[in-house]
Image: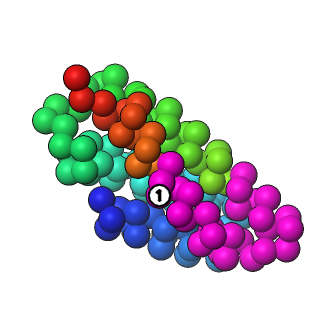
Amino acid sequence: EKIIFLITNLVLQLLLLLFPIFISTILSQLVNTSLGVYFYGKKVFKFKKITPFDIKKYLLFAIVLWISNSFLIKLLNDYGINKNISEILIVPWKAYSSYYFQNKFIFVKD
């Protein structure tokens, strides 16, 4: 849970040093998605069985998160804020929105 969030953001910080924002955010989102569906579903939200439908919802959410992450970093960068600092500034938003949407729309218990 927190370790995945930390890994993803460290990967993103490194990628932002090497690549444009678009490439950096998609690569870090792939890392997050690869690890996240299992760990968030099983460990954070205590799902016993993750269905293909849950995975599809998670993938759709990952795409939305990637687009918004990329957009926000680019927006702040266009206003003169370094892209690595921009990423740090949006971490609280990403953490809150990620937890909220996963809890309310992806890993919903019956």
Establish if 59 lies above or below 84. Answer: above
Queried whether the magenta region covers residue 16, the answer comes back as no
Lateral position of residue 69 relative to residue 27, left or right: right
User: Where is the N terminus found, in terms of image quarters?
Assistant: bottom left
* Residue in the picture at 25% in, 50% down: 44
Residue 80: % across, % down: 85, 74
* In the displayed structure image, the side of residue 94 where residue 49 appears, left or right: left
Q: How many marks?
A: 1
Q: Amino acid at mark 1?
A: Ala
Picture quarter containing residue 25? bottom right
Residue drawn at the location 68% of the way across and 70% of the way down: 86
Q: Residue at x 50, y 32 (%)?
A: 60
Q: Which residue is mark 1?
A: 95
Q: Residues within 10 Å of mark 1 (few under 14, many from 20)?
A: few
Is there any visible trace of residue 27 in the rendered image?
no
Secondary structure at numbered mark 1: helix
Which residue is at a point 59% across and 72% down the rendered structure image?
88
Residue range corresponding to the magenta coloring: 71-97
* Image location of residue 54, percent across then percent down: 33, 29
Dominant SS of magenta comes to: helix
| The image quarter in which residue 108 lies | top left
The one of 102 and 25 positioned closer to us in this rendering: 102
Q: Give how far across and how far down residue 21 sits, in percent.
A: 70, 61
**Is residue 82 on the magenta stretch?**
yes
